[in-house]
Image (spheres, helix red, strand yellow):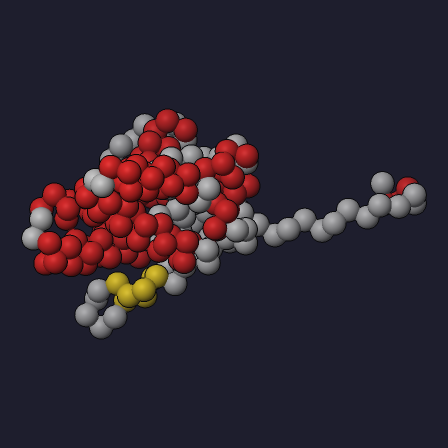
Amino acid sequence: MIVAGHASFGRSGMPLANDDDMSPGGHLVTTAAACAATAYATGSAPLTAAVAAGGFFIDVDHAVDYVLFDRQRDLRPGPFLRHFVEGRVRYTVLVLHSYELFAVLGAIACWSHAPLLSAYLVGALMHLALDIVFNGRITPYSIAAFYSFSYRLAHRFDAGALLGIAERHHVTAGFWRAFFQGAPPLKRLTPSPPRRFTNNPRYE
């Protein structure tokens, strides 16, 4: 989950695939399926919980950004969700959504043979892959580069500079519909026309 998107609904009323971004509801559904598969295959509650942590609760870093960097103080679920689906994010530090952290955790998991850490990485890699596939549709910039912490740091974590989002939409839907559906797509930044370099003072 980063910014607004739009989803369609089937006859049953359940959300179908999101047309733009990966909504938090989408992550919840896919994580639930991964947890069910893990529980069936292993019968292990701790491994299942680790997959859940990586697949869904990895998004806790959005909450950290919301409070520490965007300096929002309304901790109610509704305003928190609207802040993201309306594209009001100013900074995207997102420590847990980082290739660098994944590489470190992967090395630790290989060295220590820690099954819980490996299960967390399975869920987290699924989460990141879905973010890259779906969130890549809402930005004119490189979504693959965005998930590098170093790349975000080089852009001072500025959400506008990293994602190219220009306009916001007000969400009138209830919490759960916004949770699964998101909001109408945000308009993208239009690249500025190149400046003409000439000696003619008309263009100075």
Q: Nearer the viewer, residue 66 or 184?
A: 66
Query: Residue 187 location in percent, x, y?
Result: 51, 53
Tell me if I can see residue 12 in this picture.
yes
Q: Nearer the viewer, residue 159 or 86?
A: 159
Q: Residue furthest right?
A: 200
- The mark tally for this picture is 0
Tell me if I can see residue 178 in this picture.
no
Task: Please state if 167 lies on the left or on the right of 190 as rendered.
Answer: left
Query: Residue 17 location in percent, x, y?
Result: 32, 64
Q: Quadrant of residue 38?
A: bottom left
Query: Residue 140 location in percent, x, y?
Result: 54, 54
Q: Is residue 55 above or below residue 14?
A: above
Which residue is located at x 28 percent, y 46 percent?
121
Q: Residue furthest bottom?
A: 11
Task: Please state if 40 lies on the left or on the right of 70 as rendered.
Answer: left
Quadrant, the C terminus: top right
Q: Quadrant of residue 34?
A: bottom left
Q: Is residue 160 above or below residue 10?
A: above
Query: Residue 67 location in percent, x, y?
Result: 34, 29
Which residue is located at x 41 percent, y 43 percent?
99
Q: Is residue 197 above or below residue 38?
A: above
Which residue is located at x 64 percent, y 51 percent?
191
Q: Nearer the viewer, residue 41 or 26?
A: 41
Q: Quadrant of residue 80?
A: top left
Which residue is located at x 47 percent, y 50 percent?
144
Q: Residue furthest front?
A: 111
